[in-house]
Amino acid sequence: MEATPPTGLGVVATAHDGGPTGPPERARAAGSGAPTLEDVARVAGVSRATVSRVVNGQRRVAAEIQAVVREAIATTGYVPNLAARSLVTRRTGAVIVVVSGVEEQGSPSTIDFADPFFGRVVGGMLRALRPRDVDPILMLAETDSDRARVLSSLRNGNADGALVVSTRGDDPMPRLLVEAGLPAVVFARPGRPIPLSFVDVANRDGARLAAEHLVARGCRHVAAISGPLDVPSAQDRLSGFQDAMARHGQAFVPTVGGNFTYESGVAAMTSLLDGYQDLDGVFASNDLMALGAIEALQAARRRVPDDVRVVGFDDSSLGALSRPALTSVRQPIEEMAAEMARILLDTIADPGRRVTSTIFEPTLRIRDSA
């Protein structure tokens, strides 16, 4: 049975082949007067072969020459024949963006698209994919059947690789991609060690920045709201925060777990206030939970930052616009996602490329909440 390409953020357009009259580009020109590779080469002042290499995404062309050729493509209005290009390169010019979690039977999805995190990730990916003429296709992988569809789409040649954004530490999607021998890159370190490239932020260092800031602001009774502890980033943020606080004499950090949602931040902060009335500082493992914590504090008539200082993690637009504006550890999500896409495209071009990791440095954005 012929596979049906998935739908999502984008789909690869199909084009008619050139027929018996000659190469695809010439056939298009003869039939419709459309610009050809030769037209682009003439405007750019380079050879037809150079234009072809740029159009096909080959990397052995100097960046300045690529820029000249792309400008000539825009000037002439040339549209590559994608069907012909795929025959030459054996590539589709598309990658799947897999937003993946583990959904338990009867439970709601673990994916919260209200979180600005996802938009920032996709925006960063597009930054790297567009200059290489690669389209993203969004697929969710919440269930076994979802994951099977992703694997089938890749095996059937509907896309060249996968960019995986996983929301749970026990997510099987990364392992399934490795076992299938399919090119993929993961956002954040996988929950289990596997030979798969990933990008991440130095989470422990970011949590240390939060702890040191709260201590510098005079906080002496500090608590934490963690993410799900089966997720490596949540583990690292909590342990990094606890270690830093221990260095400043706070041997015990009261902690309540959340699941990276606003509602879980409200619930966690309410629980902390019930047990620890003298809290004067809180670190939440992402901005949505930090904003939920602020709501719970305000409902309990605890002023932020006068009574309790709050620090989040992400530096999201919601946190910057909240009142009070949220102090937050910034992870450069757009840059991380762009690097993911570059690693994947390089892996597709060179299947023998070794797996790699890229770790970005966090910074602290100080605002009104702490």
Image (cartoon, grey):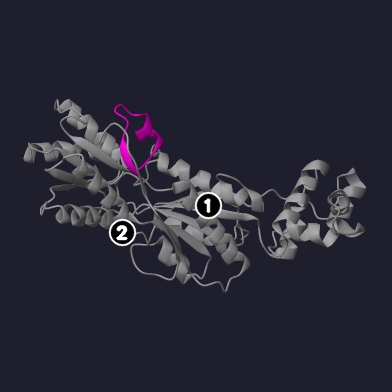
Q: Residues within 10 Å of mark 1 (few under 14, many from 20)?
A: many
Task: Tell me which segment is drawn in magenta.
Answer: 314-329
Q: Is residue 174 left or right of residue 266?
A: right
Marker disc for residue 232: 2
Q: At x 81% / y 55%, what residue is drawn?
A: 17
Marker disc for residue 338: 1
Q: Are marks 2 and 1 in contact (CB under 8 Å)?
A: no
Please state, as top left, top right, bottom left or bottom right, where the N terminus lies in the image. bottom right
Q: Amino acid at mark 1?
A: Ala
Please state, as top left, top right, bottom left or bottom right, where the C terminus lies in the image. top left
Cα gap from disc 2 to disc 1, whole angstroms: 21 Å
Q: Is residue 131 above or below residue 302?
A: below
Q: Is residue 215 above or below residue 354?
A: above
Residue 189 drawn at (x, y percent) = 38, 61
Q: Nearer the viewer, residue 321 or 220?
A: 220
Q: Nearer the viewer, residue 149 or 261?
A: 261
Q: At x 60% / y 45%, what residue is drawn?
A: 10
Q: Secondary structure at mark 2?
A: helix
Q: Amino acid at mark 2?
A: Pro
Q: Secondary structure at mark 1?
A: helix
Q: Is residue 155 left or right of residue 189?
A: right
Q: Earlier in the sequence, mark 2 or mark 1?
A: 2
Q: Is residue 20 above or below residue 302?
A: below
Q: Is residue 119 above or below residue 346?
A: above
Q: At x 90% / y 44%, what residue is drawn?
A: 33
